[in-house]
Image: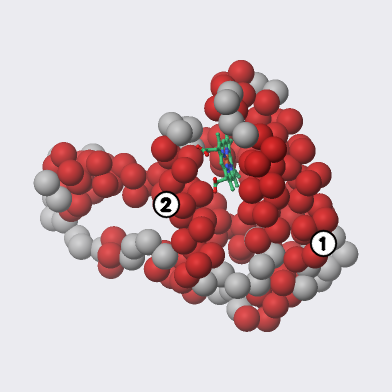
Amino acid sequence: MTQLERSSWHVKDTAVASELIELLGLSDAEKASLKALHGKAQELGPQMTQEFYDRILSQENTAQYMEGADVERLRVSVSDWFSDLFAGDYGTDYAQKRIVIGKIHVKIGLPVRYPLAMLDVVQKYGELVTEGQSEDVKQAFRKVLALDIAIFNQAYEDNQLHHLSELMGNERLARRLLQGDL
Ligand code: HEM
């Protein structure tokens, strides 16, 4: 099969965030509308975090990852992560922080389905923050959450591509292998 070169393959690291912001059409007005809710997100953060860790600790397969972890520190980190969804600034620093968080989960050997499933809790509290706001603001939140889900997944894909590229000698061959084309 003839292999096409895709321009998306050259979008790396923090450039992924700016590319996606454009794809999602996240406007400056939408960013500002989320920023106005930052305080409310901070208030709801601890409640969100409580439900978040209650769920992780409720099942053996996910609770195992918490053994030896400083859960009190993580509660603060996750609460900050949540309120930062309403930071209103989704530039390079934001993208870099989110990529690092994704990578931390790759490094602890956590299957990606667990963070993805936890987004149910994040979405619930995001909806509470935007409750009573216009449909435009609710949509702005959905966009930022979609951005974060995409960045989280990208960390997992980048890790696979990185290791496979080392084995195969280059990224193009690694991509072909993942496509089932070799
Ligand atoms: C929406 C999903 C998730 C988000 C947003 C999230 C967010 C975070 C954040 C912000 C940190 C702190 C990173 C740092 O040290 O700077 C962290 C660390 C951690 N997370 Fe998550 N997390 C998610 C899902 C999960 C799940 C499902 C588990 C386990 C089942 C988990 C286990 C851990 C562990 C063990 C650490 C500490 C890693 C270390 O310091 O070595 N996370 N997470």
Crowd band around label 1 with a 10 angstrom C-alpha radius: few (<14), some (14–19), many (20+):
some
Looking at the image, which residue is at 70% across and 34% down?
A: 53
Q: Secondary structure at mark 1?
A: helix
- Who's the residue at 69% across and 47% down the image? 76
Q: Amino acid at mark 2?
A: Gln
Q: Residue at x 64, y 41 (%)?
A: 74
For marks 1 and 2, the one nearer the N-term is 1
x and y, in percent, of residue 78 in the image: 65, 47
Tell me the residue that label 1 is attached to: 40
Q: Quadrant of the C terminus?
A: top left
Of 104 and 173, nearer the camera is 104
Q: Is residue 112 visible?
A: yes
Q: How many marks?
A: 2
- In the image, taking residue 89 as reference, residue 137 lies left or right, namely right
Mark 2 element type: helix
Residue drawn at (40%, 68%) of the image: 15
Estimate the x, y position of residue 159 in percent, counting from the top left. 34, 44
Q: Is residue 181 visible?
A: no
Residue 19, image x, y percentages: 43, 70
Which is closer to the viewer, label 1 or label 2?
1
Residue type, numbered disc 1: Lys
In the shown orientation, is residue 90 left or right of residue 128?
left
Q: Disc 2 marks which residue?
A: 154
Q: Residue furthest top?
A: 60
Is 112 left, or right, of 170 in this rendering?
right
